[in-house]
Image: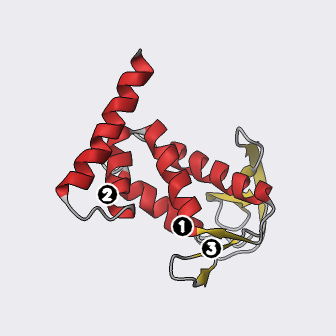
Amino acid sequence: MKCPYCGHLENRVVDSRLNKEYTITRRRRLCESCGRRFTTYERLEVSMPMLVKKDGRREAWDRAKVVHGLKVACEKRPVSMARIEEFVDSLEMAFQDMGEREISSRLVGERVMDGLRDMDEVAYVRFASVYRQFKDLNEFMDELKNVLDSRKDNRD
């Protein structure tokens, strides 16, 4: 592993830890040349299904795109980056477990909305307003009413 500070290739691992799901290894490394420490992450490379867009185009799965959409929806909300990463990890595992070569982008959007509904209702409504492309205020209000009704049902 190349040192990000001096470019030297010789370093040693001083600490390794697994995440909760045992899917990512975090390694603290020490450069033998400059003595600085840096962190690397190791994750299993798996092939994700291709996404089939609404217009029929096929697109490769892009984790960063999903994370970005969640970050925008959760901006200024009490949702940690760790929670977002865990959620995307669980999404990826679920899609891999399906065993399909292709999945619809609609399925991805619906799963993201389901997860956001559990994480943060405001983030859910933000995401839904963009994803569902509400045409007018009435559609938006109907979605808000559904959120409030489900919240009421959960309290009863």
Dot 2, crowdedness within 10 Å: few (<14), some or many (≥20)?
some
Q: Residues within 10 Å of mark 1 (few under 14, many from 20)?
A: few
Amino acid on which the number 1 mark rests in the picture: Ala
Q: Which residue is mark 3?
A: 51
Give the foreground label among 2 and 1. 2
Query: Residue 100: x, y in percent?
Result: 77, 66
Marks 2 and 3, how far apart at CA? 21 Å
Identify residue for label 1: 64
N-terminal of the pair, mark 2 or mark 1, is 1
Q: CA distance from mark 1 to mark 3?
A: 14 Å
- Label 2: state its secondary structure: helix
Residue drawn at the location 77% of the way across and 70% of the way down: 47
> Which amino acid is tagged 3?
Leu
SS at circle 3: strand
Q: On the image, numbered disc 2 is attached to which residue?
A: 129
Residue sitting farthest toward the left: 137
Residue at 67% across, 59% down: 40
